[in-house]
Amino acid sequence: MSNNDDVILLVEDDRVDIMTVQRALKKIEVSNPLYVARTGVEALGMLRGDGFPRIEPMPSLILLDLNLPKMGGIEFLKELRADPQLNSLQVIVLTSSNEPSDRAAAFKYEVDDYIVKPHSFDEFSNAMSIILADWSGGTP
C-alpha cells in the first residue's frame, strides 16, 4: 500500500465527512499521518508554511473536496498546479459533486482520480481502500 510515514492531507470543511474519512482510514488500517485543512486557503497555507504551520514532510497524497468555503477545490487546484514547489503533488478529488463540468475542470488540473462520495460508510471505506491501494505513496 504505502509507507506509514507518507503524509495525507484532507481538504474538507464538513465535520461529518472528516470523521468519516478518519473512521474509514482506521477501518482499513491506514495509520499514515493525516492533516486536515477546512478551506483551500488553509491547505495552501499549510503546504507553503504561510500563516499556518508547514506540513513536514510534504504530503504525498491530497484528498480534496470541491465544495469549500473561501476558495473552492477547482481554484485550489489551479493555485496548486501553478506553484512550482507544489505542482507535482498527487491529488484525488473526493466530493459529493457528480457534475460533468466539475469532473472536467478537475481533470483539467491533472487530478489523479475523481471519486464521488458514497452514501454508506461501508461503500465509503471500500472507496478509500481502492484509492489507497492505487496510491504510490511517494512524491516523484
Image: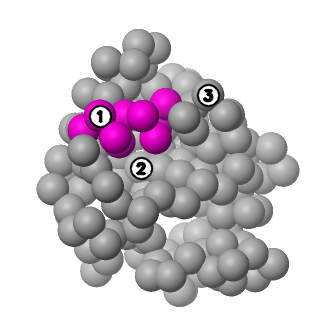
Residue bearing the label numbered 1: 27
Residue bearing the label numbered 3: 16
Q: Is residue 105 left or right of residue 3?
A: right
Q: Is residue 35 left or right of residue 43?
A: left
Q: Residue 69 or 104: which is nearer the viewer? A: 69
User: Looking at numbered disc 1 in the image, what kind of residue is underneath it?
Assistant: Lys
129 inside magenta stretch: no
Q: Residue 82 or 136: which is nearer the viewer? A: 136
Disc 3, SS: helix
Q: Earlier in the sequence, mark 3 or mark 2?
A: 3
Provide residue 87's location: percent of width, then percent of height. Answer: 49, 75
Q: Residue 38 or 77: which is nearer the viewer? A: 38
Figure quadrant of residue 125: top left
User: Looking at numbered disc 3 in the image, what kind of residue is underneath it?
Assistant: Val
Label 3: few (<14), some (14–19) or many (≥20) C-alpha neighbours in 10 Å: few
Q: CA distance from mark 1 to mark 3?
A: 16 Å
Q: Earlier in the sequence, mark 1 or mark 3?
A: 3
Residue 11 appears anywhere in the view: yes
Q: Residue at x 46, y 37 (%)?
A: 21
Residue 127 appears anywhere in the view: no
Tell me the quarter of the image containing the N terminus: bottom left
Q: CA distance from mark 3 to mark 2?
A: 19 Å
Disc 2, SS: strand
